[in-house]
Each structure stands twice: as C-alpha cells, then as structure tokens.
Image (cartoon, rainbow, N blue to C red):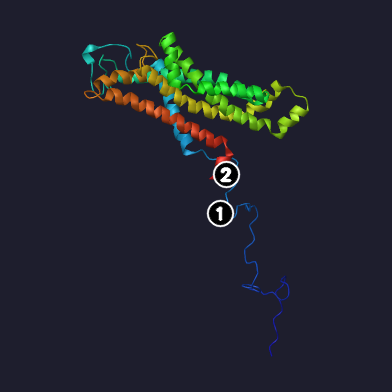
Amino acid sequence: MSESQPPARGMPSGAGPASHRGTGAPGADTSAPAPPGADTSAPALGGRAPSSRRALGAGLVIGGAIVGVVIVMALLSFVWTPYDPTFVNATDRLQGFSGRHWLGTDKFGRDVLSQILMGSRTTLFVGIVAVGVAAVIGVPLGVLAAMAPRWFGEVIMRGNDLLLAFPALLLAIMFSAVYGGSTLVAMVAIGIATVPSFARLIRSGALQVMSSEYVLAARAAGRRPTAIGLRHVLPNVSSLVIVQASVSFAIAVLAEAALSFLGLGTPPPTPSWGRMLQEGQELLFSAPRLAVVPGIFIAIVVLGFNLLGDGLRDRFDPRLEDRR
C-alpha cells in the first residue's frame, strides 16, 4: 500500500491544488466572487436600472427642434431676408421655384420666402403675447380658486366655465368686430379665450398641493395665505404652467392664422401666414404652392408645439413614466 502524499505547503489539509469538492452539489453556490470595485447594484431580470437623469423623449426632442427652427427663422428676419417682403414687383409675379426665388413669388411679385420669414415673427409674437396674457390672468385665478373658501372658489370656476363656452376663434371675431381687426386685438382676444384652460388646470394642481403635509404644516405654523401661495403652491405648479403654455401656443398660432385668413387679424402689408393662405386660395388651381407653402408651415409649427407640450408633460409627470 503506497503512502499518501503530504499536502502542499500553505494549503489546508484535505484540499488539493485542483480540488473541486462540492462542485455540482445541490444548493452549492458555484458563482465566482465579484472582483473588487465591480458594481453589484444591477437590477434583477426584468427590472429597470436606476438612473439619476430620465432620458429625453422623442416627442420632446422633435418638438423642441421644430420650435427652435421657427425661433431662428423669426430672429433671422430681423437682420436678413432675401428680398423686401412688402416690395411689389409686377414683372416677377407668379414665378415658380427657382434659384432667384426659392419659394417663388405671389401675384404681386413679392418673394414668398421673405414673407414666410417675416410671418414667423408675427406668428411667434402673437403666440407669446396671447399665452402671456392667458397665464398672467389664469394662473392667479386658479391658485385663488384653490386657496379661497369653497363658495368663492366655486364662483370663480363657474365664471370660468361661462368664458369657456365661447370658442377662442368666436371670441376673437367678436373683439375684432367691435374694436377692428389688428394684431393687438387678436393677441388680447386669443389670450382671454385661453384663460379658462390655465385656470382649470392650475386649480386642479393647486388643490393637490394644498392637501400636502408641508402646506398643512405651514398653515399650522401661522404662515399667511399669500406666503403659502408664493412659496409652496406656485413653485409646485410651475411645470403645469409650462406644459399648458406650450399647448396653448399651438392654439394661438391656429387662431391667429384663422383670423388673418378671415381678414380680422394682422392687417396688410405686415406678412402673416394666415393672410398668405387667404391670398393663395384665389390661385389654388393655377399656383397651388401659394396656399400649400404657408399651410405646411402652419401645420409644422402647430405639430412642433403639440409635441413639445406632450414631451414636457411626460418629462414633468413621473407617473406616466412609471406606467410605461
């Protein structure tokens, strides 16, 4: 009988250099230890890895890109246009696409591209002022309706519902009929017609904030209602204001184009996409590009602001991300 070999130096007794004792045994842990510095916080299969920054949605990126291009067009029109958008040149009337006039000319010989660039300035200006008027009036009304006594809040909201019964375009037409068609009248009318949307949304968000623990604690500490509204309510509904503003901007663009199409918006000779549509309908069969080009720009801008609004809503509302 041969004598067994002694164990290797530095190796415990009963373990060989190639020992696999316990390998394959039921319940044995065969996984290799993690190397030093390795990240062992990965989620289980089917889980979602934690991230400190949520990814930007496609709608937010596309909508922001479209809005950015329109803003660049409006800013560019202040310093450069291919031609004077109001210059009438009868010899160049109704020219098609060419290297000299990229989008052709209208029935008065005016460059269509120059009018599009100048019209983007008018469109953005009307939208900014109209949404600003709606936000300045609607946000305080919504916060007041949420923080005031119940009966007073109901009175505010019933008046808000009465104003909501008038469509934005109809209210703008009424204002234009009384005060005359102008850019200022169109901005104010569209802004007032958009107030109910801001007031209803902000009131809903403010009611949720008012029921939170930190607001109840501020009330118990004797904070004044004005301080609670400015310090706690408004910062927590600011995301709702941003989303509603982007959506209302698209409505304002459509309303301004419709008013200009009806001759109640921006008066000539200031270029406007809506009036370009109105002038192009007379030549819809002989020169359809005069109506198609401004119509495409109006559709793209409205699409851009709607996508931006949806993307901002998904960005600011984590509950939508959790549902997906």
| Residue 200 found in image quarter | top right
Mark drawn on residue 46:
1
Find the residue positioned furthest to the bottom.
Answer: 1
What's the residue at 41%, 24% (across, down)?
254
Coordinates of residue 91 in the picture (x, y in percent): 21, 13
Q: Looking at the image, is 201 positioned above or below residue 266? A: below
| Residue 66 found in image quarter | top left
Coordinates of residue 270 in the picture (x, y in percent): 37, 13
Q: Quadrant of the N terminus?
A: bottom right
Mark drawn on residue 201:
none
Residue at label 2? 322
Mark 1 or mark 2, earlier in chain: 1
Amino acid marked by disc 1: Gly
**Horizontal side of residue 72 vs 93, given as left or right:** right
**Front in this rendered view, residue 298 or 149:** 149
**Front in this rendered view, residue 208 or 51:** 208
Q: Looking at the image, is 324 positioned above or below residue 165? A: below
**Front in this rendered view, residue 74 or 125:** 125
What's the residue at 42%, 21% (across, down)?
255
Q: Are marks 1 and 2 in contact (CB under 8 Å)?
A: no
